[in-house]
Image (cartoon, rainbow, N blue to C red):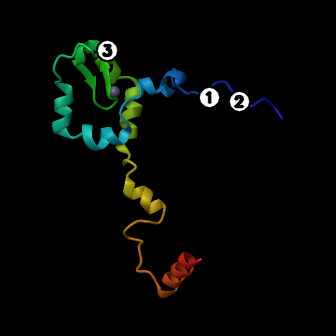
Amino acid sequence: MGRLRRSRVHNARRDVHRAARTRVRTRDLDQIQLLDLDPKRRAELEAQPLDFEKPGLAQHYCVECAKYYETDAALTSHWRSKVHKRRCKQLKEPAYTIEESERAAGLGRAERKPPTVAAVMEDVVLAAT
Ligand SMILES: [Zn+2]
């Protein structure tokens, strides 16, 4: 048995340690997809008031990546970058919703059948024991 592969396993994924920290946690993909990409909300995010706490006074914000940039040049070069393009691709896929998770667990509305007499009797027996 050879050595398990440890090198070249992070294809273009820079700084994996930083990405795992909660301090740098950004908005989740479904939050961006369902809330931020709405045209009205998007316009709001792109024209934020001056905020001295945020990088670049919150004037250069990438909605898809939920990230602030220092300058306009940094933002434009980010839009051309691989990270941004990958993110856009991820956002095109439909978000994982509660309905989908319920369907996966067999709790979806479509699959719900009226309980049969046998199933009810089984529940009564289980409750009695
Ligand atoms: Zn971006």
Marks 2 and 1 in Cβ contact (< 8 Å): yes
Q: What residue did someone put label 1 on?
A: 9
Answer above or below: position of 70 versus 81: above
Neighbor class of circle 2 (other Cα within 10 Å; few <14, some 14-19, many 20+) is few
Q: Residue furthest right?
A: 1
Answer above or below: position of 52 versus 108: above
Residue 51 position, x and y percent, is 21, 16
Q: Secondary structure at mark 2?
A: loop
Q: Residue furthest bottom?
A: 117
Callout 2 amino acid: Arg
Query: Relative to 5, is 100 on the left or the right?
Result: left
Q: Which mark is residue 69?
A: none
Q: CA distance from mark 1 to mark 3?
A: 28 Å
Q: What residue did someone put label 2 on?
A: 5
Q: Residue at x 53, y 76 (%)?
A: 127
Residue 108 position, x and y percent, is 40, 65
Callout 1 amino acid: Val
Q: Residue furthest front?
A: 128
Neighbor class of circle 3 (other Cα within 10 Å; few <14, some 14-19, many 20+) is few
Q: Secondary structure at mark 3?
A: helix
Q: CA distance from mark 2 to mark 3?
A: 35 Å
Q: Residue at x 28, y 30 (%)?
A: 63
Answer above or below: position of 113 versus 92: below
Callout 3 amino acid: Ala
Q: Quadrant of residue 78?
A: top left
Q: What residue did someone put label 3 on?
A: 74
Query: Relative to 15, is 87 on the left or the right?
Result: left
Out of 88 and 45, give the one closest to the viewer. 45
N-terminal label among 2 and 3: 2
Residue 102 position, x and y percent, is 43, 60
Q: Residue at x 17, y 16 (%)?
A: 50
Quadrant in the picture for the N terminus: top right
